[in-house]
Image: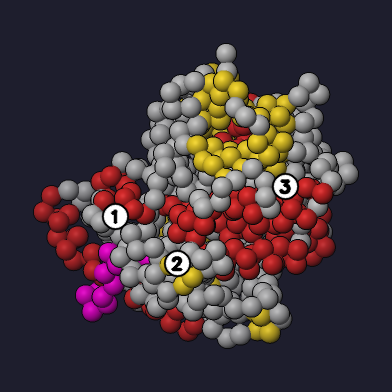
Amino acid sequence: MAVVNKPVDVVIVGFGWTGAIMAMELADAGLQVVALERGDDANTEPNWAYPKVVDEIAQSARNGLLQNLSKTTVTLRHGKDDTAVPYRQIGSFKPGQGVGGAGIHWSGVHSRVMPEELRLKSHVTERYSAKFIPKDMQLQDWGVSYDELEPHFDRFEYVCGTSGQAGNIQGRKIEGGNVFEAPRSRDFPLPPLADPPTSALFAKAVRELGYKPYALPAANASRPYVNSYGCQLGPCNFCGFCSDYGCINYSKASPQTTILPALYRKPNFSLRTNAHVLKVNTDSTGKKATGVTYVDAAGREIEQPASMVVLAAFHLHNVRLMLSSNIGKPYDPETGEGVVGRNFCYQVLNSVNLFFDKNTYINQFMGAGGVGQAIDEFYGDNFDHGPLNFIGGGVIWGRQTGNGPVRGIPLPQGTPGWGSAWKQAVKDNYLHSGRIEAQLSNMAYRGCFLDLDPTYKDAYGSPLLRMTLNWQDNDQRLSEYVGGKLQDIGHAMGAKSMSGRIIKRGTDWDTRAYQSTHINGGTAMGTDPKTSVLNKYLQSWDVPNLFVLGANVFAHGIGYNPTGMVGALAFWAAHNIRSTYLKNPGPMVAK
């Protein structure tokens, strides 16, 4: 029999970026808030103190900050007629676990979205006609506008101490910034990071090709900074240990460095770690959440009653909880009906390694997660898609994130995999190689979805989440087109040879090699309950005291890194809960 805890105002499932933001905002409103995190506690000291933090074996090879796949994982397949198999080794994506979640091991690229992305179906129909949308593509508008979200993008950037240069302040275009970006109310809180060699070479080459490079917005501090919560950041020292790692230097924005020191002082907030949530509990009507049930570190089943439930776990667990809790109608690809699991998307990533002669000195060991130069000429609808016969686009960048020997040393094609020739190639190329990438959007399709696996269960006896996903013709056409631009840029940068991955027509999704943790959709927000799980305020259409956060609310996959959007939506949801919902609990949008 489950132990029943004392009721609270709010229970939050998951304690990464979105959980920390929501906890801070609702505790600040005076509510009694409990956060449940299925992983361990973690903080800069002692978890990422030197020399622990620079241990590539522990963090990159053994995935020290990632989900323990022996306890719970997902199953994968390309199509609905295939047999799904469990994801037993970290490969294509890296779900985080523990306090801070993926907000610990992220790189720090901190982007917004283009306004047309939030009304993509309307925009494509207006510019190209409804016939331009492929038959199996499920485009829809998100239900919220860029103008509504702009103050919350701004808020999140100033909490993070994001480094960058504006390209559009209230409609005034600024050279050196991203002139394609939507209007922002003010500049970034910190100036851009200094360019490492790869970024400088990239910027020079693309400028000569006629493009307009800009410094990537980076949640890696370029200067000392104190945010509105009183949390302090130190300037990045380009140590190269960002992606896969917690920051030794208090330089990368994470819940630990920007929110938790202030949140932990609030007497009306409490955190329970090693608490694996099994389901959201509802009353006899199924229309009201009454709390959650979780398993604690001792294996006991615990009920936590609450007046409001917030799902703020990593994308995949949020979708799984909705399905396991029977909240919302599961998506059926045969009929196209249902919403939970619908609009499941990923992201297409083309990555090209560049090898230069010995007069071009790079040193990939040094770097920072978000540092780089980028171009947006091929993002969103910044170019004419009409003659190209695909929808979507992405950002092209030259980043230098840091690359050690365990994480992998890129070598020219044809290099042996071992022996003296391999050693010589490492010696010849390590200090003279760089990488450029194109990170591209992924649309929603009828045959790409999430559901509960009928065969496999986790250590807690719950069905695993099943992922059905593969690249579609639209994605492959987009990838080929932008991949050609990548190769043009590599030649312009002076590379003597190139190698890497460009997804082309006929290419299946390969789950073995890391690509991106930017998984999207599954509990999409929108204006129509028939095609969305949540309304514009991230409130469940079916259970009004349930709010769901994270990239799982995206209606399609975007080309930018999703964290900026995820954080802005969390502040947006919290703002509307405080200003509207708490005054009159119930649906904020009529169904």
* Magenta span includes 483: no
- Tell me residue 269's x, y (percent): 57, 45
Q: Nearer the viewer, mark 3 or mark 2?
A: 2
Q: How is the image coloured?
A: secondary structure
Q: Mark 3 is on which residue type?
A: Leu
Q: Which residue is mark 2?
A: 232
Q: CA distance from mark 3 to mark 2?
A: 30 Å
Q: Are marks 3 and 1 in contact (CB under 8 Å)?
A: no
**Which quadrant of the figure has residue 332?**
top right
Quadrant of the drawing holding the C terminus: top right
Task: Report the side of 73 relative to 534 (left or right).
Answer: left
Disc with the residue nearer the chain's start (3 vs 2)? 2
Q: Amino acid at mark 1?
A: Ala
**Which residue is disc 3 drawn over?**
538
Measured along the vertical axis of the image, is residue 484 above or below residue 330? below
Disc on res. 49: 1
Does residue 176 sit above or below 515 in this rendering? below
